[in-house]
Amino acid sequence: MRLGRMDRYRRWCDSCARQERLRQFRERMAKPHTIYALADPYDQAVRYVGETANVQRRYREHCRGETGVKVAGWVAELKEQGMFPVLLILETDVVGRMAIKREWYWTKMYLMQGAALLNFTPETRERFTSDNGLIH
């Protein structure tokens, strides 16, 4: 089947968009990242693990509720009580794919300790921490 001119143009545009997203991802991952956790101010229990190139900006986003529904709901509950999550810096200056691997490491460590992380459902928690999971 021969592609029409518009189909070829759409494929070319899709290819360009993918290349641009890949370029942006590589550029972002070349910057040093921070692995961080958000903890409950009452009992210091870790509730979220993440990675970012700009930890101050990301913490502000969390505090404004500009994140996932579960985390935003938890932060809203804390704010009603006049509190905010505690920011814990776990690692700094982690570059490239190692940032994602280190985020996974810390996530798995907290899950194995029984932390109720908000970025997981019970099903994904079980899959993530199993012997066949993402990290060993």
Image (cartoon, helix red, strand yellow):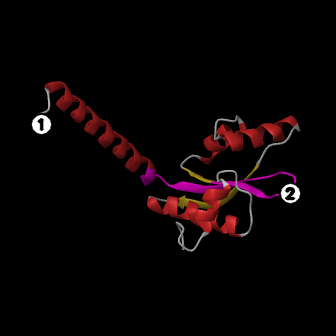
Horizontal side of 9 relative to 83 (left or right) equals left
Structural crowding at the residue carrying mark 1, measured as other residues with C-alpha within 10 Å and reported as few (<14), some (14–19) or many (≥20): few
Instruction: Label 2: state its secondary structure.
Output: loop
* Closer to us: 2 or 81: 2
Quarter that holds the N terminus: top left
Q: Earlier in the sequence, mark 1 or mark 2?
A: 1
Question: Identity of the amino acid at label 2?
Answer: Asp
Mark 1 vs mark 2, CA separation in Å: 64 Å
Between 46 and 24, the one nearer to me in the picture: 46
Vertical position of residue 121 compared to residue 112: above or below: above
Q: Does the magenta run of residues contain 94?
A: no
Residue 91, relative to residue 52: is it above or below? below
Residue 122's spot in the image, x, y percent? 67, 57
Q: In the displayed orientation, state which residue is furthest to the left.
A: 2
Q: Would you place residue 102 above or below residue 58 in this image?
A: below
The residue at 32%/41% (across/down) is 18
Badge 2 density bin: few <14, some 14–19, many ≥20, Cα 10 Å: few
57 displayed left or right of 44: left
Residue with the mark numbered 1 = 1
Q: Quadrant of residue 112 in the image? A: bottom right
Q: Residue at x 54, y 59 (%)?
A: 93
Q: Secondary structure at mark 1?
A: loop
| Residue lying at 51% horizontally and 64% vertically, measured from the top left | 101
Q: Give the answer, above or below, for where 103 lies relative to 6.
A: below
Residue 36, magenta (yes or no): yes
Q: Amino acid at mark 1?
A: Met
Residue 52 position, x and y percent, is 56, 50
Q: Nearer the viewer, mark 1 or mark 2?
A: 1
Q: Which residues are magenta?
A: 29-49
Mark identifier at residue 43: 2
Q: Residue at x 63, y 64 (%)?
A: 126
